[in-house]
Amino acid sequence: MTTVAFLGLGAIGTPMAKHLARASLGLRVWNRTAARAAAFAAEHGVVHAATPADAARGADVVITCFPVSSDVERLLDGADGLLAGLAPGATLVDCTSGDPAGSQRIAAALAARGVGFLDAPVSGGVVGAEAAALTVMVGGDAALLARVRPVLEVFGKKIVHCGAVGAGDAVKAVNNGLLAIHLWSLAEGLAALRKAGVDPAVALDVINTSSGRSNASMNLFPERVLTRAFPRTFRLGLLDKDIGIAAQVAREQQVPAPLLQLTADLFRAAHLAMGEEADHVEVVKWVEQLTGVTIAKD
Ligand code: NDP
């Protein structure tokens, strides 16, 4: 039987781990704030590991889901670190939306111990995670992915091998770069239309059957902006990080990408102004402040 460990019970990690708990994989969980892992373990009848090393010890597959790659790197070393528990032949699957260079460093440190590594960021949000319908974009050895695929299928609906280590991170960053661009540009466009006397609900109705539609126009604005609900599911700070990685990927490849860089700067400014708790869709409130227009129904 495959034994799995899951580290990082945040907004997206928790629903992913819930599916693993139900799948009889001898799950053990670890979280920086131990109370969260203790509560999860008690609720789902799994093991609460005291340290990353304890979580990894005896696990065939160790899954991490933290904000950034450097959080994973910092957990590798020391007596309590992942490397102290990971056995040769085990695989670390990092579901963090990380950065390619960070993933390459982690893969090299693990390879020196005979441990495999896949970067495997996910898309689909908390709703997709709850429904076990995430898209998982994977970088690393294809044969290794074939081995761990049954574990990823517990929470993933579409699992795609994107290329070498770091390729999953790069695809995820560009995807989220597009999300950021769509959010910001749709907010600007609807602010202008609102001022021109057009009800944003009417504008969205047109856009959503026309060529400018996106996840932002079809789902996020109708459900979260027009209703003024703005639920907190994915922190603005994390989208700031993602669009920054997308711009970085373009720079490293020497691809001119002024739109990615501009959007990264805009999101950094909004993140600094709005703080760590703000949700990514709340960037629309920042655009509303800049434009002096509230994007609400008539
Ligand atoms: P959260 O901020 O909700 O949770 C972060 C998790 O990481 C918590 O368990 C937190 O522990 C832990 N953590 C934070 N910093 C450290 C650290 N330095 N060392 C150890 N543990 C740490 O983030 P999400 O769950 O939303 O996001 C996780 C990853 O998934 C990110 O890379 C994000 O971009 C990506 N993602 C998120 C989506 C979403 O909809 N939320 C969608 C797709 C991808 P503690 O409990 O102690 O704070």
Image (spheres, rainbow, N blue to C red):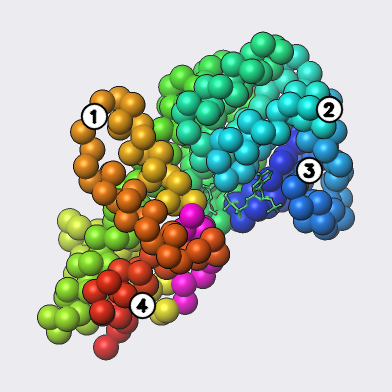
Q: Amino acid at mark 3?
A: Val
Q: Amino acid at mark 2?
A: Ala
Q: Is residue 218 left or right of residue 57?
A: left
Report helix, strand or loop for mark 2.
loop
- Measured as percent of width and height from the top left, residue 50 is found at 86, 41
**Which of the marked residues, 4 or 2, is nearer the chain's N terminus?**
2
Q: Residue furthest left?
A: 196
Report helix, strand or loop for mark 1.
loop
Identify the residue shown where x is 84% and y is 53%. 38
Dominant secondary structure, magenta:
loop
The residue singled out by tag 1 in the image is 255
Are the residues flagged by discs 3 and 1 in contact, CB closer than 8 Å? no
Name the residue nearer the viewer: 34 or 219: 34
Q: Callout 2: few (<14), some (14-19), or many (20+) C-alpha neighbours within 10 Å?
A: few
Q: Amino acid at mark 1?
A: Val
Are the residues flagged by discs 1 and 4 in contact, CB closer than 8 Å? no
The residue singled out by tag 4 in the image is 226
The residue stretch that appears in magenta: 229-237
The residue singled out by tag 3 in the image is 29
Please tell me the numbered disc located at residue 79.
2
Identify the residue shown where x is 63% and y is 31%. 73
- Measured as percent of width and height from the top left, residue 115 is found at 69, 17
